[in-house]
Amino acid sequence: MKNQNIVFIAIAFALAFALAPVTQAAPSPGGIPTSTAAANQSATSANSTGPEGENLPVITIHSAGNILRGKTGSFVLDMKPALMLGGMYVNFKVSGTAVPGVDYRSLLSPVRIGQSGYGVISLTTLLDPRGSFNHQAYSVVVTLEPGAGYAVGKPSSALIWISTSCVLEACW
């Protein structure tokens, strides 16, 4: 039993040291903050969603390019720096001229960014229910939203155009 207690204490210390930068822990005399303003300020900066927030990973988004109907495209999220102990979920909203359920399968927020620092939002397009006479392109814009534990960087939104082959090749 004595060896198990030592192992438990060693794991607890290792976890405390690993989480200290994330929680912005700092030693203080007596273990109590000297003022409530200092405690409130550190809590506020830990929850900051701006790029100026301390030690928060910054998330940006890019599109992998325009796509044809019936194909799948991608929005790629990039987190700098990547988290060593796991991933993170990032909120986003969708806008544009394309209609979910008509032009593409609906996208669900949030999306997970993995340990590698990258995440993918797959955009699966649907065949054109409006008929082949309509060669209009439709846009899908994904915009990152602020959330706990990360900051939204620039670019914070990305665009994909959904079109028929004639629009991309200008066949009219």
Image (tube, rainbow, N blue to C red):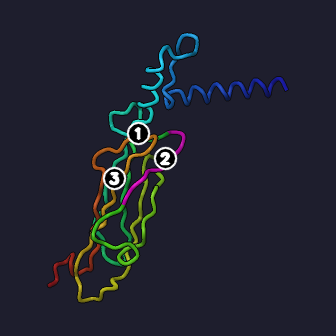
Image coordinates of residue 102 in percent, x first then y, are: 37, 78
Mark 1 or mark 2: whose residue is earlier in sequence: 1
Q: Residue at x 42, y 65 (%)?
A: 107
Quarter of the figure with residue 104: bottom left
Badge 3 element: strand
Q: Earlier in the sequence, mark 3 or mark 2?
A: 3
Which label was assigned to residue 88? Answer: 2
Residue range of the region highlighted in magenta in the rendering: 84-93
Picture quadrant of residue 105: bottom left
Q: Horizontal placement of 164 versus 116: left or right? A: left
Image quadrant occupied by the C terminus: bottom left
In front: 28, or 133?
28
**From the image, which quarter does the N terminus lie in?**
top right
* Label 3 sits on residue: 61
Residue lying at the far right of the rendered structure: 1
Element marked by disc 2: strand
Between the C-alphas of marks 3 and 2, the distance is: 15 Å
Amino acid type at circle 3 is Ile
Q: Mark 2 is on which residue type?
A: Met
Q: Nearer the viewer, residue 37 or 43?
A: 37
Where residue 66 sits in the image (x, y, percent)? 28, 68
Task: Check residue 148 for magenta coloring.
Answer: no
Do residues under tags 1 and 3 come within 8 Å of each other at their CB atoms? no
Q: Residue at the front extreme?
A: 36
Relative height, residue 122 to residue 57 (above, below): below
Against 63, is 87 above or below?
Answer: above
Which mark is on residue 57? 1
How many residues crowd mark 1 within 10 Å: few (<14), some (14–19), many (20+)?
many
Question: Dot 3, how many residues are within 10 Å of its Cα: few (below 14), some (14-19), or many (20+)?
Answer: many
Give the Cα separation between the discs numbered 1 and 2. 10 Å
Q: Are marks 1 and 2 in contact (CB under 8 Å)?
A: yes
Mark 1: amino acid: Pro
